[in-house]
């Protein structure tokens, strides 16, 4: 028999069980027929017939026999047979009463015994039965006493009926069964189902105990029970609950890993949005705290729980993670006992190969949690709100890991891989743009460039709103909108603060900042009324007020239209929410077009997050048209522009004519060419030599994000070469004074200074 056939048989048996029990249970005695015929109606047998009707069978039998001995009328012979039939009926009633008494149905037994007495007043068995019933149920008709036996007779059939309903619900359980979307209607439907179940179970129990006669009560009770089972099946099938279990490689339970996985799931799906600059986890906050239950570690408890699960399945979902020997895990997801997904999660698929080896187990378990959350979101669509567009568990895993690492380079790489796995991941895109702005601002065009890209991202997010929705709907993107608008406003204000910009540029930057601030205030106000985002909005509200005060103090006004893009920046909307591979293809396409260099560099700056694309760009024939530009060299090398080094800034233009755009370009030239370069620039050869030493300092900086800034700080302290730095670090007194001095100088530049350990690693190449 197929599994479907077994389910059908089980369903029919469970549905018929209460009706069979009810039908087999003895009910009330039938109505007592009145004797008739010549034995009663004939005038010669009238006295004997009256005794027969009254139940005085002994008197009736004596009278009929006397008549037969004298005149032998026909009515006397019929009367004798009638007496014998009545005695047989009385014996049958006594037998039914004895059966009811033996099974504890005392009310039914009493009725049968009384009927036997009405048939035969001299029936001693009926009298004895009534006496036994009276002793057994003595006092049950007095208030407050004697309820134990009736209740005992009702409890077992009541519980049996409930178990039958649960079995029917288990068979009917399907995840595809529809439920009302309105929570209030769901509660109302469940309450109605519970009421039907209790009423049906009570009716069946009353029938089995002998308190209900006929088939009407059991039939209605069974119908109510089936309705209750269907409602329970609907609820069980769509309930958001899961059992979580992590096993080690030897198939034994791992309590520590299970606790980590449950905590990770709760953090990803049940906490309010966190992290303004670097998003932490996800923005999903609708996962109930009681949704996940870890399997107990005791063998007995596990066996009991599994047995209960096999019968009831109160938690539809099950997540089992089996850890491998080193850096992988097998993830099995099932729902209502049916497999949903099986994946092998490898650490190498989640983090770059050069990432630190520690934390491999946590990374794999984070991948399992992300896979489960994405799987849940497909069935429980409210969980998709807060994922900000991502439907790929690998992308989500990398985004989560990026928000936790303290290594800026690793964070950027993880975010780049997250975007490449799922370009629709809005949270990863936001964090990626900020990571580029903090690490390699040239790749996003400085503060103005990152602000424009954030405005383009905001525009794309707004395009995801439902038709007719308000500007700040509760669609899961509310926290991300606040983040994007905040960083956009900061970017435009930083651009406005740049004294090197012209007045029209600064005025435009201030107008853009005002627009972002105004939109942020509206978004924060709307989010304060959203239960899942109100805490995040409350934290962002003071920041929005501070930005508004800054804009007002600078002379900016309100821009009610919200962020906008200049006509020359509209192309950025095509770039954001695209994969990095697609961005590289766009860069190659634009590099071949006339006046497409700006768009190509913008696309390439984002696509260079993948090391293989950055490495291949320098030799890609499709990008040959960009080779003569300094921004392209900065992108493919990751080095600062030569113009960012203070001693060389005034010679940036003539150096560009010599195709020297980054420090590495000067170092790539043989030292023998320094004289010719010095002549072309009109500087002494010794000056070019000093530039070469300074470029080597910049190129070997341990943190490329601060290569130009730290190199300028060292140069300001008279450290213009690695040899000078090494000599300084070899003098204890000078070494102790250098770090505080760097901290004091960098404070004015708002740049974190290098610490002693960083300086040591910086000088290490000189000692090699």
Image: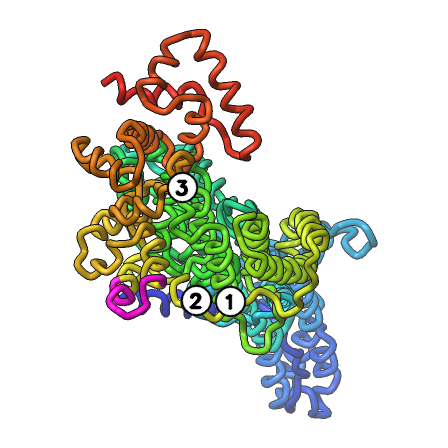
Spot occupied by residue 394 in the image (x, y as percentages of width and height): 35, 51
Cα–Cα span, label 2 and label 3:
36 Å
Cα–Cα span, label 3 and label 1:
33 Å
Task: Tell me which numbered mark, 3 or 1, is placed earlier along the sequence.
Answer: 1
Crowding at dot 3, Cα within 10 Å, few <14 / some 14-19 / many 20+, comes out as: few
> Mark 1 or mark 2: which is in front?
1
The residue beneath circle 3 is 650
- Horizontal relation, residue 758 to residue 239: left or right: left
Quarter of the image for residue 330 reads top left
Q: Secondary structure at mark 1?
A: loop
Task: Tell me which numbered mark, 1 or 2, is placed earlier along the sequence.
Answer: 1
Pick whichever, 74 or 504, lies toward us: 504
What range is drawn magenta here? 588-598
Spot occupied by residue 521 in the image (x, y as percentages of width and height): 67, 58
Q: Are marks 1 and 2 in contact (CB under 8 Å)?
A: yes
Q: Secondary structure at mark 2?
A: helix
The residue beneath circle 1 is 565
The residue beneath circle 2 is 573
Task: Tell me which numbered mark, 2 or 3, is placed earlier along the sequence.
Answer: 2
Name the image quarter holding the N terminus: bottom left
Cα–Cα span, label 1 and label 2:
9 Å
Pick whichever, 276 or 117, lies toward us: 276
Q: Secondary structure at mark 3?
A: helix
Identified at 57% across, 70% down, the residue is 181
């Amino acid at each position: 028999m197929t599994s479907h056939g077994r389910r059908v048989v089980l369903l029919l048996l469970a549905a018929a069980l209460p009706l069979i029990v009810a039908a087999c249970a003895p009910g009330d005695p039938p109505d007592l027929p009145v004797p008739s015929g010549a034995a009663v109606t004939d005038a010669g047998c009238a006295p004997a017939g009256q005794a027969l009707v009254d139940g005085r069978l002994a008197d009736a039998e004596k009278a009929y026999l006397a008549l037969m001995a004298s005149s032998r009328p026909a009515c006397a012979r019929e009367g004798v047979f009638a007496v014998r039939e009545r005695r047989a009926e009385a014996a049958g009633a006594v037998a039914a009463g004895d059966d009811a008494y033996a099974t504890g149905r005392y009310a039914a037994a009493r009725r049968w015994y009384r009927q036997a007495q009405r048939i035969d007043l001299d029936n001693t068995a009926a009298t004895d039965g009534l006496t036994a019933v009276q002793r057994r149920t003595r006092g049950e008709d007095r208030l407050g006493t004697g309820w134990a036996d009736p209740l005992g007779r009702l409890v077992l059939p009541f519980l049996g009926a409930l178990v039958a309903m649960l079995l029917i619900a288990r068979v009917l359980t399907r995840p595809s069964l529809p439920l009302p979307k309105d929570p209030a209607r769901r509660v109302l439907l469940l309450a109605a189902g519970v009421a039907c179940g209790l009423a049906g179970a009570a009716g069946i129990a009353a029938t089995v105990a002998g308190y209900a006669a006929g088939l009407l009560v059991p039939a209605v009770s069974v119908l109510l029970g089936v309705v209750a089972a269907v409602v329970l099946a609907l609820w069980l099938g769509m309930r958001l609950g899961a059992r979580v279990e992590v096993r080690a490689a030897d198939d034994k339970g791992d309590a520590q890993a299970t606790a980590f996985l449950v905590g990770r799931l709760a953090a990803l799906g049940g906490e309010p949005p966190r992290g303004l600059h670097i998003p932490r986890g996800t923005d999903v906050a609708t996962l109930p705290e009681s949704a996940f239950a870890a399997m107990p570690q005791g063998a007995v408890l596990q066996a009991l729980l599994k047995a209960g699960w096999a019968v009831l399945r109160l938690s539809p979902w099950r997540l089992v993670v089996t850890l491998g020997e080193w850096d992988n895990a097998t993830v099995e997801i099932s729902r209502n006992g049916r497999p949903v997904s099986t994946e092998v999660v490898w650490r190498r698929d989640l983090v770059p190969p050069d990432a630190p080896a520690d934390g491999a187990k946590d990374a794999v378990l984070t991948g399992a949690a992300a896979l489960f959350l994405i799987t849940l979101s497909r069935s429980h669509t409210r969980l998709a709100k807060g994922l900000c567009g991502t439907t790929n568990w690998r992308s989500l895993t990398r985004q989560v890991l990026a928000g936790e690492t303290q290594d800026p380079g690793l964070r950027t790489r993880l975010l780049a891989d997250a975007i490449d796995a799922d370009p629709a991941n809005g949270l990863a895109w936001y964090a990626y743009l900020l990571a580029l702005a903090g690490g390699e601002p040239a790749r996003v065009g400085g503060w103005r460039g990152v602000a424009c890209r954030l405005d383009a991202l905001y525009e794309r997010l707004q395009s995801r709103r439902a038709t007719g929705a308000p500007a700040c709907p509760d669609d899961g993107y509310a926290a991300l909108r606040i983040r994007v608008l905040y960083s956009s406003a900061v970017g435009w204000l930083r651009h406005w603060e740049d004294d090197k910009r012209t007045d029209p540029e600064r005025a435009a930057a201030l107008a853009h900042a005002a627009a972002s601030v105004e939109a942020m205030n509206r978004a924060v106000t709307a989010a304060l009324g959203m239960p899942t985002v109100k805490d995040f909005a409350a934290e962002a509200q003071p920041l929005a007020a501070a930005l508004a005060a800054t804009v007002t103090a600078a002379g900016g006004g309100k821009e009610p239209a919200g962020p906008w893009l200049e006509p020359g920046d509209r192309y950025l909307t095509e770039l954001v929410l695209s994969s990095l591979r697609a961005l590289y293809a766009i860069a190659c396409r634009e590099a071949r077009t006339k006046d497409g260099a700006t768009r190509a560099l913008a696309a390439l700056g984002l696509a260079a997050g993948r090391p293989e694309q950055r490495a291949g760009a320098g030799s890609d024939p499709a990008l040959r048209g960009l080779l003569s530009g300094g921004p392209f060299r900065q992108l493919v090398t990751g080095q600062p522009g030569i113009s960012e080094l203070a001693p060389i800034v005034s010679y940036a233009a003539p150096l560009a004519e010599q195709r020297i755009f980054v420090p590495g370009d000067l170092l790539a030239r043989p030292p023998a060419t320094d004289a010719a370069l010095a002549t072309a620039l009109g500087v002494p050869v010794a000056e070019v030599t000093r530039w070469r030493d300074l470029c080597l300092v910049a190129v070997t900086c341990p943190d490329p994000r601060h290569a130009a800034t730290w190199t300028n700080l060292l140069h300001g302290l008279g450290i213009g070469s690695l040899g000078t730095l090494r000599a300084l670090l070899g003098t204890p007194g000078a070494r102790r004074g250098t770090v505080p001095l760097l901290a004091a100088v960098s404070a004015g530049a708002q740049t974190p200074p290098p610490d002693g350990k960083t300086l040591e690693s910086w000088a290490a190449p000189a000692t090699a």
